């Protein structure tokens, strides 16, 4: 007699939810994805059209195999979908040679044999349209680049649906009911039975498991800007790699000039917590207006380090981080109910990993936690710092 397929409900049809759905469907599960909004939107964490992918991982060299696994998955999905998902234009990182994060990026390269070229500030300024201060260095890794958000999410959804997964839009999960029978209650009042639930609700995750996640997750408002440089600068800006700069006020990063969604030079500042920041933002009440003070640090960075990219702002967008205190992700089963899998806290650097996170969650649904890194486990987070 054939065994019944496990019924898996994935809460959240964003970045991780679609990757989890594809991976669980590949393993033979009967998958239903619940998404409160629509396919690819700007109210969560995946808005803004593109995401950096980098192997020179300063957040910890343990992330490198997961980046590589995901990049291989994007390439596999490119072959399946015929769409371009991953653009390997290289990654250029600049900073003081004493900067611990730049040192960590270089160590990750050494540990994992990642091809890199390290040059001084003068040579960097000759080769690329960045101006590192004298004494800084630049590390170029040809494997870096960016992924195209909508194309990636289209490909993940197409794969999941092709394997029999269903995706329901406008379906907001209100509660995970974890009694003898596992069920998900929707806002509509519908109760959906299942064998496993994967919580991948991005910035809204702690609202569904407040007792377990409330103290660990902090939603942050972040702003992406697109500047319009002078026409004479476009050639060099278009040909440059994705870039990052380790500065005292945060990690500034950006993309070559391009027309992904918005024509311009896209950049942002990556910090888990800015001074004075409120640790308890309500994701449904985030200020989505752009203010002068949002763009001031980006303009100041360009004036100092990337003068060719300076120009009027073509656009700016608000996007949400869901941060853990350490910046590491949470990928684990619920400590009180192993039928519930949690994929949350991607702390502003999760997109590039989504295929690998999908695989880890599909394995957790099947009762196998052997590949989950210790840094992603709830007990590691609970034993560390809190907000
Ligand atoms: C400004 C910015 C820049 C970034 N840059 C990078 C980068 O360069 N490289 C990189 O790798 N990562 C980057 N990231 C991080 C990356 O985009 C996120 O880590 C990733 O998108 C998180 O995926 P997620 O699935 O957790 O969230 P989302 O993609 O937001 O998905 C969560 C989904 O759950 C849905 N949902 C919420 N509540 C419910 C509910 N109750 N019921 C049903 N559905 C629900 C939401 O509508 C949403 O679609 C960046 C993030 C931001 C904000």
Image (tube, grey):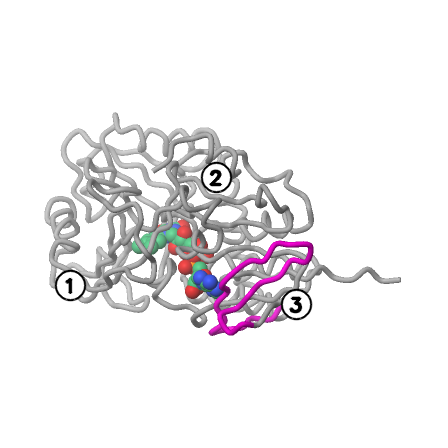
| Residue underneath mark 1 | 313
Give the quadrant of ligand 1: bottom left
User: How dense is the environment of label 1, judged by Cα within 10 Å: few (below 14), some, or many (20 and up)?
Assistant: some
- The residue to which callout 2 is attached is 64
The foreground one among 258 and 323 is 323
Q: Where is residue 47 in the image (x, y as percent from the top left)?
A: 35, 62
Could you tell me residue 113's position as x and y percent? 47, 33
State the separation of the CA atoms marked 3 and 1. 43 Å
Q: Along the polypeptide, which appears first: circle 3 or circle 1?
A: 3
Point out the frontmost of discs 3 and 2: 3
Helix, strand or loop at label 1? It is strand
Q: Position of residue 53 (x, y in %)?
A: 40, 49
Q: Which is more N-terminal, label 2 or label 3? A: 2
Q: Do the residues labelled 3 and 2 touch (CB within 8 Å)?
A: no
Please tell me how crowded label 3 is: few (under 14), some (14-19), or many (20+) other residues with Cα within 10 Å: many
The residue lying furthest to the right in this view is: 1
Circle 2: element type: helix
| Residue bearing the label numbered 3 | 163
Q: In this view, does 7 lie to the left or right of 285?
A: right
- Based on the displayed image, in which of its 4 quarters is residue 205 positioned? bottom left
Look at the image and say whether residue 18 sits in the magenta stretch. Answer: no
Whole-number angstrom distance, CA of label 2 to CA of label 1: 34 Å
As helix, strand or loop, the secondary structure at mark 3 comes to loop
| Alpha carbon separation for disc pair 3 and 2 | 29 Å
Question: Residue at 69% across / 54% down in the picture?
Answer: 180
- 221 or 141: nearer the viewer: 221
- Name which of mark 2 and mark 1 comes first in the sequence: 2
Mark 2 neighbour class, 10 Å CA radius: few under 14, some 14 to 19, many 20 or more: many
- Span shown in magenta: 164-189
Please name whichever residue, 286 or 141, is drawn nearer the observer in this view of the structure.
Answer: 286
The C terminus sits in image quarter: top left
Q: Is residue 147 visible?
A: no
């Amino acid at each position: 007699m054939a065994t019944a397929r496990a019924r898996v409900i994935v809460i959240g049809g964003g970045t991780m939810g679609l990757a989890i759905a594809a991976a669980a469907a590949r393993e033979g599960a009967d998958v239903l994805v619940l998404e409160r909004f629509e396919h690819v939107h700007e109210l969560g964490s995946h808005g803004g059209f593109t995401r950096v992918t980098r192997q020179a991982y300063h957040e910890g060299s343990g992330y490198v195999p997961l980046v590589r696994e995901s990049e291989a998955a994007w390439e596999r999905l490119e072959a399946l979908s015929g769409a371009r998902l991953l653009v390997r234009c290289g990654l250029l990182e600049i900073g003081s040679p004493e900067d611990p994060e730049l040192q960590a990026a270089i160590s990750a390269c050494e540990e994992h044999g990642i091809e890199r070229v390290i040059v001084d500030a003068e040579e960097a300024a000759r080769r690329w349209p960045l101006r590192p201060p004298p004494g800084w260095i630049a590390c170029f890794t040809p494997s870096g680049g960016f992924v195209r958000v909508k194309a990636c999410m289209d490909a993940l959804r197409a794969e999941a649906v092709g394997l029999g997964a269903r995706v329901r839009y406008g379906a907001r999960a209100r509660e995970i009911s974890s009694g003898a029978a596992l069920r998900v209650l929707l806002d509509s009042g519908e109760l959906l039975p299942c064998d496993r639930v994967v919580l991948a609700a991005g910035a809204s995750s702690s609202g569904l498991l407040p007792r377990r996640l409330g103290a660990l997750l902090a939603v942050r408002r972040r702003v992406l800007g697109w500047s319009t440089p002078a026409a004479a600068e476009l050639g060099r800006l278009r040909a440059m790699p994705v870039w990052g700069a380790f500065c005292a006020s945060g990690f500034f990063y950006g993309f070559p000039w391009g027309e992904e969604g918005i024509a311009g030079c896209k950049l942002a500042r990556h910090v888990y917590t800015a001074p004075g920041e409120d640790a308890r933002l309500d994701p449904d009440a985030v200020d989505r207006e752009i203010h002068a003070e949002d763009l001031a640090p980006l303009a100041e960075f360009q004036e100092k380090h990337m003068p060719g990219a300076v120009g009027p702002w073509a656009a700016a967008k608000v996007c949400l981080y869901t941060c853990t205190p350490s910046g590491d992700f949470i990928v684990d089963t619920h400590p009180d109910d192993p039928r519930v899998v949690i994929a949350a806290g991607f702390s502003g650097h999760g997109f590039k990993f989504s295929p690998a996170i999908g695989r880890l969650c599909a394995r957790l649904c099947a009762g196998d936690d052997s590949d989950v890194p210790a840094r992603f486990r709830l007990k590691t987070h609970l034993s560390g710092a809190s907000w």
